[in-house]
Image (cartoon, rainbow, N blue to C red):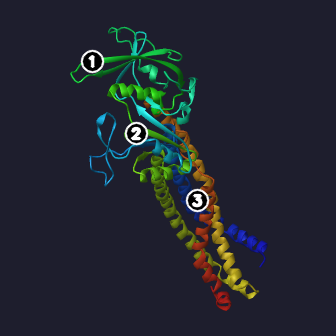
Amino acid sequence: MRVSDLIALILENLGRRKARVALTAVGVVIGTAAVVLLVSLGVGLQRSATQQLGGIGDLTRIDVYPVYGEPGGGGGIVVMEGPGGVPGIQQPINDQTLEQFAAMPGVTAVIARDWVNGGMMLNYGRLEGYGSIMGLGTDNAADLGVTAEAGTLTLSKGTAVIGAMVPQQFFDPRVRPGQEPPPPPDLLGQTLKATLIKYSTDGVEIRKMVQVRVVGVMAESRGEADWSIYMPLSDVTAYNEWFLGKRINRQKDGYANAVVKVGDVDQVLDVADQINELGFQASTPQSFVQGINSFFIVLQVVFGGVGAIALLVAAIGIANTMAMAILERTREIGLMKAVGATNRDVLSVFLGEAAGIGFIGGLGGVALGWSAGQIINVLALAYLAGQSAQSGAPPPTEAVFTPVWLPIFSLVFATLIGVISGLYPALRAATLVPVNALKYE
């Protein structure tokens, strides 16, 4: 039997019992729609969570910290004395360490950092302010992945680049109750007076005045940089040496932190594992993304399993329909065999009819599932946008997302379910004895 004749016969047989085929296909429609909708919901939630996390962290960035522990601990690692004589640094981040990080495959930049280890107050006219002050071991803050909103990100001696939220931390300490507070100042190009404060062993306060010129303002990133004041590492090292009253030996004391930038997001976790194996603490937002992805993959499998149960019920309906069709068409099967149809031809006809029911139901299910997903997307985004406006968080861009592979997979799966469901009835039809089939009442 030619393929064209087989397809024509299958379509004719399905058309003779439109109501029964339609009712049987409804079960496949519901099951396929459930698979498409639920899996799309899981994918949409995963993408939304990933985008939200990606918006508050650079996924190509790894923050590296030294490991701290009690003297003599650390599993045989020699514990070294840290800055300020504080014991507990098991392995410092020094220049040799930075070279090791830079030599790792995929690493594009390694930046040493250190914080101001003492009191530091900033003044601009009558205003006082504060921020997270840290020194960068690079002359361009753009190496951290930040962008400039105004000015430049190039650092030189006596300059600073501030985050977008730093001006909001300036206030007038002389404002009286009920008096309107001054607006956040425009600090770009301004010179701030920084007061370093420390205390002697007998409790006497010692101050030192330095000047810092703001050369750039970073664009808002919803991360650490928004509240930070970046300065050259040499300036911050000089401040800390004044606080400590001695020179800092970077070979022994190391740096407080290092930022490792990786060119490809897919290599971030591998680089972080290599850094951890060297005895350091490596932290990256990509690890949280991986955990989120693992959770949502499990969620998608569970959702898909719920839809698959509905398809299983539909498969029983297809098997029942095909079994009834064989009983009703027993004499027709005998006649087909009498005129020369082989067992393979009969098997192909009935398997084709079962596959056709699955295919029709799959098409309807894909269309229904996709349409329902779009409706839920509109309603969910409208609700979540209102919630985001109240909390101040960025609104999600999608709640339900249907990847291209999902409708194709669902359609093929529904068709395959039809074939499997019709396999036993088709085998029964193919093995009927022509004489007995012709005499069947």
Residue 49 or residue 114, whichever sits in front: 114
Secondary element at image label 1: strand
Vertical placement of residue 397 versus 427, above or below: above
Q: Which residue is mark 1?
A: 205
> Who comes first in sequence, dot 1 or dot 3?
3
Dot 3: within a 10 Å radius of its alpha carbon, few (fewer than 14), some, or many (20 or more) residues?
Answer: many
Quadrant of the frame with the N terminus:
bottom right
- Residue in view at x 29 percent, y 37 percent: 86
Secondary element at image label 3: helix
- Give the mark toward the camera: 1 or 3: 1
- Residue in view at x 42 percent, y 29 percent: 237
Vertical placement of residue 17 versus 98, above or below: below
Q: Amino acid at mark 1?
A: Glu
Counting from the top left corner in percent of width and height, residue 123 is at 41, 15
Q: Amino acid at mark 2?
A: Gly
Q: Which residue is mark 3?
A: 29
Counting from the top left corner in percent of width and height, residue 349 is at 69, 76
Vertical placement of residue 128 versus 287, above or below: above
Q: CA distance from mark 3 to mark 2?
A: 64 Å
- Give the mark toward the camera: 3 or 2: 2
Q: Which residue is mark 2?
A: 254
Residue 343 or residue 253, whichever sits in front: 253
Q: CA distance from mark 2 to mark 1?
A: 28 Å
Residue 143 or residue 383, whichever sits in front: 143
- Residue in view at x 51 percent, y 37 percent: 55
Dot 1: within a 10 Å radius of its alpha carbon, few (fewer than 14), some, or many (20 or more) residues?
Answer: few
Vertical placement of residue 199 versus 345, above or below: above
Counting from the top left corner in percent of width and height, residue 62 is at 48, 43
Secondary element at image label 2: loop
Quadrant of the frame with the C terminus:
bottom right
Q: Amino acid at mark 3?
A: Val
Residue 256 or residue 167, whichever sits in front: 256
